[in-house]
Image (cartoon, grey):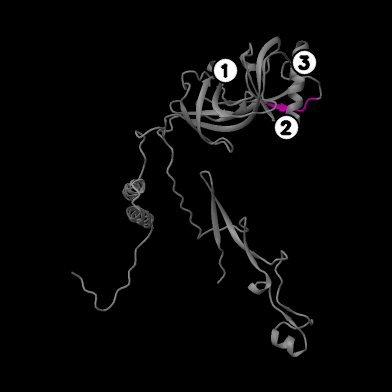
Amino acid sequence: MAFKKYSYYLKGNKVAIVESDFSSSSGTLAVAHCTLSGYTTKDTCEAAGGQWIPSSGSSLNGVYEKYVSPKASIADGLEIEYSYSPIFNRQALGHEGADLHKFLGWGSNGTNLLLFTYGEDAVADISSLFAADDWVYISGSGRWSGLHQVKSTGGTTGVLTLKTKCNLKASMLDDITTTFVVDETIVGYGSSGVTDVQVFSDNLEEEGGSSYYFITDAADAENNGLFSSIANSSNATLGVGNKITITSSSGAYTSTAADIQAAVGDTVDIYQAFYEQITVYEGVNVLEDESFELDLTRYQAQAIVYYLKAKLAEDMVDVEGREYFMRLFKKQLEKERAGRKRGPYTIQGFFGMRNY
């Protein structure tokens, strides 16, 4: 019966599955064969005067086991159970606009991670939603999902600054003077503006092209928000494609043609942006002191008691006491793991068993 052997390794709070594979020292598996053609068994090969070469699957042929990425999909029969003790509890109920907020993507101010959001027809005011030092939980981002702490809110700019470090080469243009051309481009204005926009555009291309940028502080509300970029051969300009917004009634992400309004000498902030449908949860309690509540089973709680007693015995140089309580600690953890078994428990009886 064919079977597959798997193993796993941990990376942070993620579990990776790898599959066992066999290979010879030369890197390939040799198939058993005869030095003479036409013979498929050892007996007939040797009877004809040939030499039978065994398969490299034998341990005598330098075969070794290695782990590789799984080669086939497993529809049934593979079960993963992974438990860990978190350093925070998420209390959010998932009510959009109350303790759950949607963002359009992320960027950087050169030092910190930024999250961008924009309402259906105006910049979102997030000043009342978050406060400095608040803890939040991000989901939906392949890179930034997890626990973060707020550094500051952008008020009516729709930019939330986190304490998480994030440095991008083409991160932002701060208070840059530009000209908006109707439905077409954003042009650097004045001697400094032209140079800065050109450098910003070149850096985007060098980094493989952030295909979006986020604009704030424009005089016309239509010129603020998250825009997709389009190819543009003109120097010191950024091509404008679609504008991404969040529909207030349904919370849906919508991409429509940008309706850029003409403006000359407008001073704005322009950020390199990466579009992701990010969800941010409030109501996160982070482990800080003994008042934090851990979600432990009774077995785990008792195991902690034994572990603390072992440590006390260690401090008192009581070797026997330490070993005694450490044995109880490990035994208690074994009981806790056994308690996770699913399905019926079966015991073997004998003819003399009686019920009392």
Quarter placement of the N terminus: bottom right
> Circle 2 — which element?
loop
> Picture quarter containing residue 87?
top left
Q: Which residues are magenta?
A: 228-232
> Circle 1 — which element?
helix
> Circle 3 — which element?
helix
Label 3 crowd (10 A; few <14 / some 14-19 / many >=20)? some
Q: Is residue 155 magenta?
A: no
Of labels 2 and 3, earlier in sequence is 3
Q: Position of residue 118 (x, y in %)?
A: 57, 22
Q: Residue under circle 3?
A: 194
Q: Position of residue 312 (x, y in %)?
A: 33, 46
Q: Is residue 162 left or right of residue 206?
A: left
The amino acid marked with disc number 1 is: Thr
The amino acid marked with disc number 2 is: Glu
- Magenta span: chief secondary structure: strand
Instruction: Give the numbered dot on residue 326.
Output: none
Instruction: Give the numbered dot on residue 207.
Output: 2
Q: Residue under circle 1?
A: 157
Label 1 crowd (10 A; few <14 / some 14-19 / many >=20)? many
The reply to whether dot 2 and dot 1 touch (C-beta < 8 Å) is: no
